[in-house]
Amino acid sequence: MSWKGFFEGIESVTETVLLQPLDGIRELELSNWFLSNGLNWLFLVIGFVAMIYWLKELKNYNDEGTEDKTSTSHSYLG
């Protein structure tokens, strides 16, 4: 088996199997922009939910007052 055949096999699998859903999304864009960008909207919603959750947890942790704030890495930081 040559290296060229190996890499052509990877190319074939990538183009015919792994990128097939993206080709369908690209074709869908011509008819409905919002539907074709549904994956982007989903990631955006997941990011916002994660950010809101993280900020809520940081606020809860800060309100508990359990963090030791006596030492800093530099004396001028307080």
Image (cartoon, grey):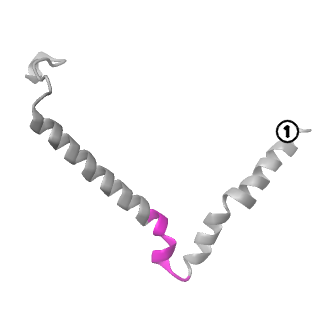
Q: Residue at x 68, y 56 (%)?
A: 18
| Magenta region includes residue 34 | yes
Q: Is residue 34 above or below residue 77?
A: below
Q: Is residue 8 above or below residue 43?
A: above
Residue under label 1, please give it.
Answer: 3
Three-letter amino acid code of the residue under disc 1:
Trp
Q: Is residue 46 above or below residue 37?
A: above
* Residue 39 located left or right of residue 28: left
Q: Which residues are magenta?
A: 31-40
- Name the magenta segment's main secondary structure: helix
- The C terminus sits in image quarter: top left
* Residue 18 located left or right of residue 61: right
Q: Residue at x 83, y 43 (%)?
A: 6
Quadrant in the rendering for residue 44: bottom left
Residue 37 % position (x, y): 48, 69
- The N terminus sits in image quarter: top right
Give the SS element for disc 1: helix
